[in-house]
Image: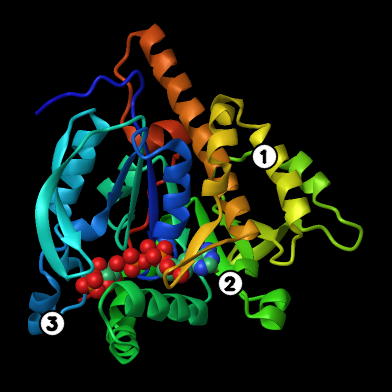
Amino acid sequence: MERQKTAHKPLIVAVCGDSGSGKSTLTDGMVQLFGQDSVTHICLDDYHTLDRAARMRAGITALHPCANNFPLMTEHLQRLARGETILKPVYDHRTGTFGPPEEVKPAEIIFVHGLHALFTPELRRLAHVRIYLDPEAALQQQWKIMRDSTSRGYTVEQVREQIALRRRDSRLYIQPQKRFADIIVRFYRGSLYYRTRDLAHLDVRLIEAKHAPKIDLSDVLEASHNGRKPALRLVEEVYDGVLRDVLEIDGDISHQKACELENCIWAHMQEINHLRPERLSMLGRFYVGNVLRQSDPLALTQLIILYHIIHARNRLRQSAEEEEVSGREPPASGEAVEGRGGREREPEQRS
Ligand SMILES: Nc1ncnc2c1ncn2[C@@H]1O[C@H](COP(=O)(O)OP(=O)(O)OP(=O)(O)O)[C@@H](O)[C@H]1O
Ligand SMILES: O=C(CO)[C@H](O)[C@H](O)COP(=O)(O)O
């Protein structure tokens, strides 16, 4: 297998969540910002074992582990992590069938998004940054109906049926992955959404795991005061029984304030500031059917996650340099960077 010469060990960012939870929307903006040729982007839907018709015949949903090729996706991520090129299967959502495989080369940042991106211990070990998308359930349903009925060849009624059929598998196989995330991203409908019904003005919560490496947002929080209440707030909240840091972004933040806060966040990422003038408009983009829209809360969310990614990449580079100086082999992915001590609990495996 060809080995790609990358100056640094690749950093893997896993973006996990249920169907229609906003994984592609969140990830695409970050990928476009770097430029499609500068990062590697994998969607794990390509590792389905059955096409749409075969799944229907077998009475299995795409969320069930048996409908996905875990050995192949794991091997491919291991290879990319080693700097090797892979030949990846391709699943075409427009037709519900597989297309010809495609060659994928590793870049220094590898985005992996999918239903099961944090499902196995090995997938979690490979990921340096672990994100889980957990929008309000009614919102996710609205998003999925809109997307599947405009670009995946389903009628609205068929999408509703699919959602009902998948509920059990989502609870058993997808949602338990939440507990392995460094950051859970929760979009939800707040007061401005209810006044305007505009998806560009959703509220967001970024819920951090206790073990998640911290980034310094103190100046951003300071700048977020706008007279009444801050547009960005860091609070402590009990989530899934655990007290966590939660960063709240107000859906009614003004565009001017959002730009001001974005400036503050960019100032923390000097390494990628050259990307900014040309590609700034890539952040916050989402589709309502076929119509392209822009959302300030989404752009801020993507920028904060980018800040985490750049922070993780710097730590990875630093630990690689230290290993080189000490003459030891660099340790494998996630744990080396995060310095996580404890063992993870497994998602519940039921069938
Ligand atoms: N942050 C957001 N703000 C507004 N709308 C959003 C947002 N995220 C997603 N959406 C809407 O939800 C739809 C589905 O999102 P997306 O395709 O990103 O989900 P996904 O998790 O990648 O789904 P799948 O796993 O089924 O491919 C989008 O086409 C868009 O209309
Ligand atoms: O849960 C999903 C993630 O995108 C899809 O439904 C799954 O990939 C199957 O795709 P399709 O419904 O287009 O056959």
Q: Residues within 10 Å of mark 1 (few under 14, many from 20)?
A: many
Counting labels gives: 3
Q: Quick one: 308 or 141, which is closer to the camera?
A: 141
Residue 126 picture quarter: top left
Residue 8: x %, y % from top left: 36, 21
Question: From the viewer's perspective, is 324 left or right of 297?
Answer: left
Q: Is residue 68 above or below residue 344?
A: below
Q: Is residue 271 above or below residue 305?
A: above
How far separated are the C-alphas under marks 3 and 2? 32 Å
Q: Which residue is mark 2?
A: 199
Q: From where the camera sits, is residue 205 visible?
A: yes
What kind of element bears circle 3?
helix
Q: Residues within 10 Å of mark 2 (few under 14, many from 20)?
A: many
Q: Which residue is mark 3?
A: 56
- Amino acid marked by disc 1: Ile
Quadrant for ligand 1? bottom left
Q: Which residue is mark 1?
A: 265
Question: From the viewer's perspective, is 191 left or right of 112?
Answer: right
Q: Residues within 10 Å of mark 3 (few under 14, many from 20)?
A: few
